[in-house]
Image (spheres, rainbow, N blue to C red):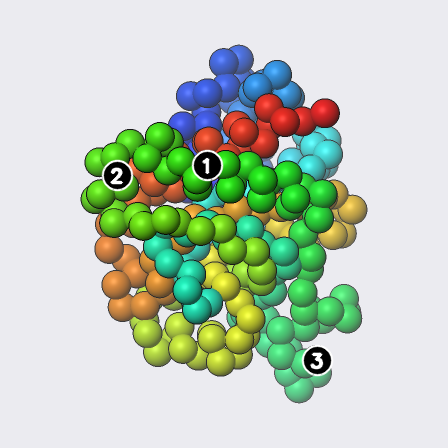
Amino acid sequence: MSAMHEELALLLQAMPDERRITVAGRQFWQGHWQGQPVVAVLSRIGKVAAATSATALIERFGVGRIVFTGVAGGIGPGVRVGDVVLADAFVQHDMDASPLFPRHEVPLYGCSRFATDPVLNARLAWAAQQVLARVALHLGPAAVAEFALDAPRLHTGLVASGDRFVSTAAECRALQQALPDALAVEMEGAAVAQVCADYGIPFAALRTISDRADDDAHADFSRFIREVASRYSLAMLSMWLTQQP
Ligand code: ADE
């Protein structure tokens, strides 16, 4: 699952037999990749679009697990552009039904955080480490130089989702204060995590850091996805799928 076309384009090229199906106004590509049955979906941006897409994947396509790849803004200390964050849990940073419920708690679920699947996470972490150890091989030396990628790292931890593109230093600081352990911010993951928890479907998410969620956050966004994030995702997912039992 990805939110933007640029994030999914390389993966679709790699699926030899994919068939495009439209459900709920969005496109799904059903086929095989690395010998595994796969459904790819372009969710579009935001929590509701992501929740609809995840529900369709489960209800209409019967998928047994969901992996989200895309980009995120880095808000944790030392989480730099070009690093990758593997979410071990998600929170909706814009969920606030206080004073009825504590801030961030999803009403009537009794929790604010939804964990991702530890088995998927262990395998994806391994795949991500393999790719990050050889970035020049996967991106080409020109992209490494252009985006000043310097020994990019994998971080594992909390990711915050909300229906806002965070692009001011002030908003970033407010998020850091409200959720001091959050590593990154994006716009879909917590919604998919909640849908997957509802259905009991294992879920994982890998996000490449495209910006620091500050006043420079919009710079060269599409180009970064094309040249860096989509290539990381392709290499990491391919490495992970080839290791499937
Ligand atoms: N995805 C990538 N960068 C982001 C940001 N700064 N805010 C929200 N979602 C993002």
* Residue that badge 1 annotates: 131
Q: Looking at the rendered structure, which numbered label has been put on residue 143?
A: 2
Q: Amino acid at mark 3?
A: Phe
* Residue that badge 3 annotates: 101
Q: Is residue 181 left or right of residue 114?
A: left
Task: Depth check: give the residue in front, 12 or 205.
Answer: 205
Q: Earlier in the sequence, mark 3 or mark 1?
A: 3
Mark 1 vs ligand 1: CB below 8 Å: no
Q: Whole-percent x and y of residue 128?
A: 51, 41
Q: Are marks 2 and 1 in contact (CB under 8 Å)?
A: no
Numbered disc 2: secondary structure: helix
Q: Residues within 10 Å of mark 3 (few under 14, many from 20)?
A: some
Furthest toward the bottom, the residue is 99
Quote the CA–CA distance across marks 3 and 1.
42 Å
Q: Amino acid at mark 2?
A: Ala
Residue name at image x 53 percent, y 33 percent: 237
Locate residue 91: give its quadrant.
bottom right
In the image, residue 92 sits, relative to residue 142, either above or below, namely below
Any part of residue 159 in sight = yes
Q: Residues within 10 Å of mark 2 (few under 14, many from 20)?
A: some
Q: Amino acid at mark 1?
A: Val
Please state, as top left, top right, bottom left or bottom right, where the N terminus lies in the image.
Answer: top right
Q: Is residue 108 left or right of residue 182?
A: right
Numbered disc 1: secondary structure: helix
Any part of residue 210 in sight = no
Locate residue 174: give its quadrant.
bottom left
Numbered disc 3: secondary structure: loop
